[in-house]
Image: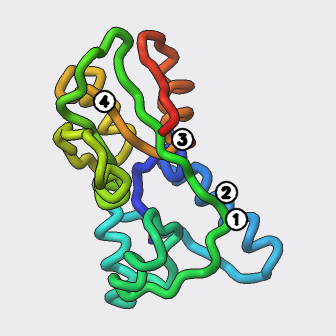
Amino acid sequence: ATQKENPPFTLTGDDGVLGGVLPAYYARLSQLSGFTFKMQPYATFEDAMQAVQNNEADVLAVYHNNIFDARSHGFSTTNAFATLNMTELTRKGTQTIRTIAVPSRDINIVKSKRQGSSLSAELKGYDSAATGFEALKNGSVDALVCEMPAATWILNNARISGYNLVAR
């Protein structure tokens, strides 16, 4: 189970085929292990989690939080094999950040990292980093906080300038 549109992890190509990092990873894992994996896309990350919890799917392709949060949702996790750093995108010239777009599945991570800081910007949840970036482009938010691979994918595919990328 995976979220359908969560670039660069999952995205539907013009041909209607699900592509991205996760389908490629599981295809390679199939080659190496002999197990067969079928990616079943769901509209949201929460829908994908629920599909596993309801035994409609066997595996959640990726979990975007920590082991404690995973266990609170009833998931047994494998060892972490990568840490995805969060980053912030703003429009050039942004002086004040009042609202921040965050993929909904990452809001608790961002909140926990902000504890004890003076950051008081409002966090707005979006289905993915890509939809959060649309909000940044149209001025609905002042910044986007997302995983570095997603930010890199967004900037490479948008092929536009006028944005600052800040590692956090």
How would you rate the neighbour count of disc 3 (Cα within 10 Å): few for under 14, some for 14-19, many for 20 or more? some
Task: Give me the residue at 41% from left, 28% from top.
Answer: 89
Per the image, the residue denoted by label 2 is 24
Tag 1 or tag 3, which sits nearer the N-term? 1
- Which residue is labeled 1 in the image? 27
Name which of mark 4 and mark 2 comes first in the sequence.
2
- Name the amino acid type tagged 1: Ala
The answer to whether mark 2 and mark 1 are in CB contact below 8 A is yes
Query: What residue is shown with label 3?
Result: 148
Mark 3 in CB contact with mark 2 (< 8 angstroms): no
Residue at the image position 23 percent from the left and 48 percent from the top = 125
Give the labeled residue for mark 4.
Answer: 143
**Looking at the picture, how far across and down is residue 102, in whole percent?**
31, 45
Name above or below for residue 88 compared with residue 23: above
Q: Is residue 16 above or below residue 73?
A: above
- 3D distance between C-alphas at marks 3 and 1: 23 Å
* Local SS, label 4: strand
Q: Earlier in the sequence, mark 3 or mark 4?
A: 4
Disc 2 residue crowd, few under 14, some 14–19, many 20+, Cα 10 Å: some
Amino acid identity at mark 4: Ala
Q: Position of residue 58 (x, y in %)?
A: 49, 85
In front: label 4 or label 2: 4
Q: Amino acid at mark 3?
A: Met
Above or below, comparing residue 75 to residue 163 in the picture = below
In the foreground, 122 or 45: 122
Q: Which SS class for mark 3?
A: helix
Q: Position of residue 117 (x, y in %)?
A: 30, 45
Give the residue type that dot 2 points to.
Ala
Q: CA distance from mark 2 to mark 1?
A: 5 Å
Vertically, is 142 above or below 148?
above
Quick one: 24 or 114, which is closer to the camera?
Answer: 114
